Image (cartoon, helix red, strand yellow):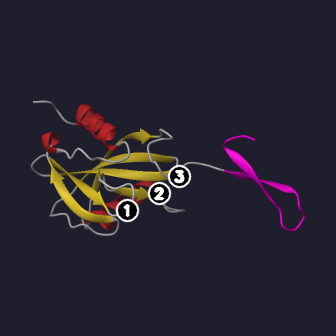
Amino acid sequence: MNASKDYLICPHCGEKVTRYRNPFPTVDIIIEIPENQIILIKRKNYPFGWALPGGFVDYGETLESAAIREAKEETSLDVKLRCLLGAYSDPKRDPRFHTISVVFVATARGIPKAADDAVEAGLFFRDSLPSDLVFDHSKILCDYYLKCIQND
């Protein structure tokens, strides 16, 4: 059997029906605020630790809309998308299942307030990032600082 699909039995005719297994689309958002800080959230659910705000793309939703929605849901801030950083698709990036994340860089003003899947929201400088980053967010942030932020 192919690892990307399996079969169900049709309850009406008894024939095999192919059921495809596909990765789940997600978005992550690097939210920049004045003073060269970014916002991270502490997750309420497994896997526990600090993460970029983000989540699953809803059916019928654009990636951009999902990023804006997830940022608002988890930080209570309205963001303005600045650019697309990239896509991250390592099947092991999420210990729960295979996800593909499209990562946006956004700007916001104000003080983040944790909501939805976040128990805490924090502001971090590049040299003060928490050590317990989940998923592949340390790689994403490394790419962000390499591609988007000028080294002084």
The kind of residue tagged 2 is Thr
Q: Amino acid at mark 3?
A: Phe
Q: Position of residue 147 (x, y in %)?
A: 27, 33
Per the model, the C-alpha gap separating discs 2 and 3 is: 14 Å
- Please tell me which of labels 2 and 3 falls first in the chain: 3
Three-letter code for the amino acid on which mark 1 is drawn:
Asn
Spatial CA span between label 1 and label 2: 25 Å
User: In the rendered image, which residue does mark 2 sit on?
Assistant: 62
Cα distance in 3D space between marks 1 and 3: 18 Å
Does the magenta portion include 60? no
Mark 1 or 2: the one toward you: 1
Residue 24 image label: 3
Residue 82 in the image: x percent, y percent? 28, 48
Residue 13, numbered label: none
Direction from residue 68 to residue 35 in the image, left or right: left
Q: Residue at x 36, y 51 (%)?
A: 28
